[in-house]
Amino acid sequence: MVLILAVEAVQTDKSLRELLTGNVLVLTVSRILWSMSDALVYPYLSLYILALGGDKPTIGWINALGSIAACILYPLGGYIADKAGRARFVGISTLLYVSSFLIFAFSPDWRWVALAVTYQNIVLFYMPALNAIMADSIPPGARGKLYALTIAIPNAVRIFTPYMGGLLIDRMELIPAMRLGYMISFTVGLFVSFLRVRYLKETIQGEGIGRDIFKIIREGYGDAFRSIKWTFQNIKGYAIVSMLMATLGSIVLPFWVVFGYEVIGISEYQFGVIMLIGGIGKTIFSLYIGPLVDRIGSKKCFLITFAISIPGMYLFTLAKSFWTAMLVYFLLVISSAFMWIASSAYLANSIPREMRGRVMAGLGSGMSVGVTGGGYSSGFLVFIPMSIGSIISGYIYDYNAALPWILQTVFLTIGLIMTLMWLKDPEKVQV
């Protein structure tokens, strides 16, 4: 039913139907396929780490390792995307990412999971190119709608997957179910790699980077500093809010399922149902959020996010039942959809095409409020605060299980004030 609504939203608007072609179609289909597999395992990763001998601080450290590892090659990824092109780079690099699922699947203990997370984030250095090729392929004036659809349609498929993951765990027990889920992700990922290699089309005429590895490294990291300078000269307000959101998101993100299981008394299967309901809401509301972003601008949609998520984060700590947790989580996922779609459109509208890869290497493609299924922040500027948040997250949760959400409430309030003071919609929309 939800998938039908998403498809009808495209069919009823001829311009959107015509726009959902080429690279946008390939990347949307890729996300649909990922949605059928990745969501089986990702929400339950923290429980997998615990089952393989880790503890709460271990969860934080592993997530921090992933963020630190991503910093290493992201600047090079942005440089390659702008100088040598995006399409082929994305296709081939996806194969490296897919191989990480094999390490997850056969991990004998939490140390191998840490290795898998680290390796996976290192090879994700193609993400600036992926984000840039999507932004290049969507024309101004339709970015809110198209970003919403590229989220809503895959999410319409994805909404049942966390539920199926919880059901698998309930039937098979956690470790065997997770191993099966990662093997499914590996198989689907191979097909996604083929689609990207075969059908993605280039969107920029690169000047080439040559074969001198030392020159590539020198220029790549040198360009990273220049892109940082451009970022803080042109979209400083967004950058600061994005870094703050990344910090607070990493504190709370790994522990939704853990808090639900240990404090509220929700089983893995029940949390899968909660994510199912949240996914349905996100899919339907995204279809309305996208046009709203195009009409009223990103900043006002950011304010809607804060208005919902500030009280929502605190209310989650007060949840005493499955139904209360589901209602609060539903509202938080909707608020995160506002943030993700609005921030994706904001970046595409603000960054010139010729430097999108390098700037998006620093800021990623959007912001999240830290809800599972609400979008994943990326970029070397946000990875550093994410690492700090991840390192302290496990200790904070161990000290007081509700404290991550209380801190989230405080930081979101600060983010609201920063948005009001510093963040402005771009005066000139970039093509």
Image (tube, rainbow, N blue to C red):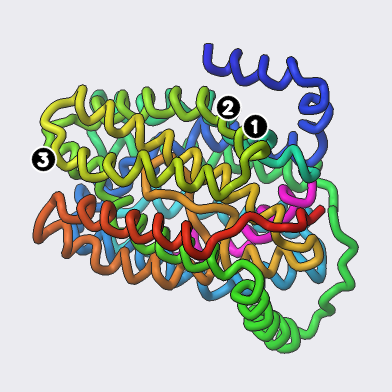
Q: Is residue 263 visible?
A: yes
Query: Which quadrant of the structure image shows residue 271?
Result: top left
Q: Residue at x 31, y 59 (%)?
A: 411
Q: Residues within 10 Å of mark 3 (few under 14, many from 20)?
A: some
Q: Residue at x 70, y 81 (%)?
A: 223
Residue holding disc 1:
291
Give the amino acid at mark 2. Tyr
Give the amino acid at mark 1. Pro
Q: Residues within 10 Å of mark 1 (few under 14, many from 20)?
A: some
Q: Tag 3 or tag 2, which sits nearer the N-term? A: 3
Q: How far is the residue under mark 1 from the one under mark 3?
A: 39 Å
Which is nearer the eye, 64 or 102? 64
Which is nearer the eye, 276 or 33? 276
Total marks shown come to 3
Q: Residue at x 67, y 15 (%)?
A: 8
Residue 228 left/right relative to 87: left
Q: How far is the residue under mark 2 from the one under mark 3?
A: 34 Å
Mark 2 in CB contact with mark 1 (< 8 angstroms): yes
Q: Which mark is residue 288?
A: 2
